Amino acid sequence: MYERKRRRPVSEINVVPYIDVMLVLLIIFMVTAPLVTQGVKVDLPKAQAESLDEDSKPPIIASVNAAGEYFINVGDNQEAPMSATDLAVIVAAQIQKDPNTPVVVKGDGAVPYNYVVQLMVLLQRAGVPSVGLMTETPEQ
């Protein structure tokens, strides 16, 4: 009669489905990576926060109130709100005159976080190398 040939079992793994999964994951990570890396570059202190020395130059204080209006402590009319472009021009001129002038952001306690971030981005575009955040010491 007919003699059957025995087949040997194949001991190889089919890797094509794994490659497909890896390519899909690669595409997902490539699409989401730019979304994760957005942010404002801030130079964080290396030690505990301390107040500015009295001997140091007076800082440029860019303020934002709860209504989102901008103020700066440079110029004649420091109490009048100004537009974002005016603030950027004044800060850029001060930084160009003296690049070592410290810049500090002062935000109202009730201001939305978005306004503070927009002010920091505005200062960054004006050429400020690092920005500090102004706070009050809590009363004990």
Image (cartoon, rainbow, N blue to C red):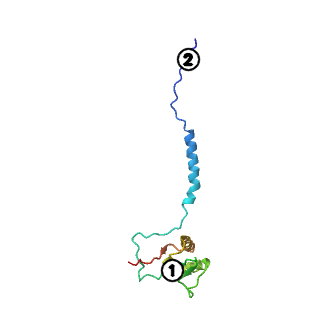
Residue 93 visible in the picture:
no
Horizontal and vertical percent position of residue 120: 54, 72
Horizontal and vertical percent position of residue 118: 57, 72
Q: Could you tell which of marks 2 and 1 lies nearer the N-terminus? A: 2
- Gap between marks 2 and 1, in whole Å? 91 Å
Amino acid type assigned to the residue bearing label 2 in the image: Arg
Q: Residue at x 51, y 80 (%)?
A: 61
Horizontal and vertical percent position of residue 97: 53, 81
Nearer to us in this view, 136 or 7: 136
Q: Is residue 33 above or below residue 135?
A: above
Name the secondary structure under disc 1: strand
Q: Residue at x 56, y 48 (%)?
A: 25
Nearer to us in this view, 78 or 19: 78
Q: Quadrant of residue 44?
A: bottom left
Residue furthest to the left: 140
Name the secondary structure under disc 2: loop
Mark 2: few/some/many CA within 10 Å (<14, 14-19, 20+): few
Asked if disc 2 and disc 1 are in contact, CB closer than 8 Å, the reply is: no
Q: Is residue 69 above or below residue 31?
A: below
Amino acid type assigned to the residue bearing label 1 in the image: Ile
Q: Which mark is residue 13?
A: none
Q: Quadrant of residue 135?
A: bottom left
Q: Which mark is residue 61?
A: 1
Q: Residue at x 52, y 35 (%)?
A: 13
Q: Residue at x 56, y 78 (%)?
A: 92
- If the image is split into quadrants, where does the N terminus sit? top right
Q: Which mark is residue 4?
A: 2
Q: Quadrant of residue 80?
A: bottom right
Mark 1: few/some/many CA within 10 Å (<14, 14-19, 20+): many
Horizontal and vertical percent position of residue 60: 51, 80
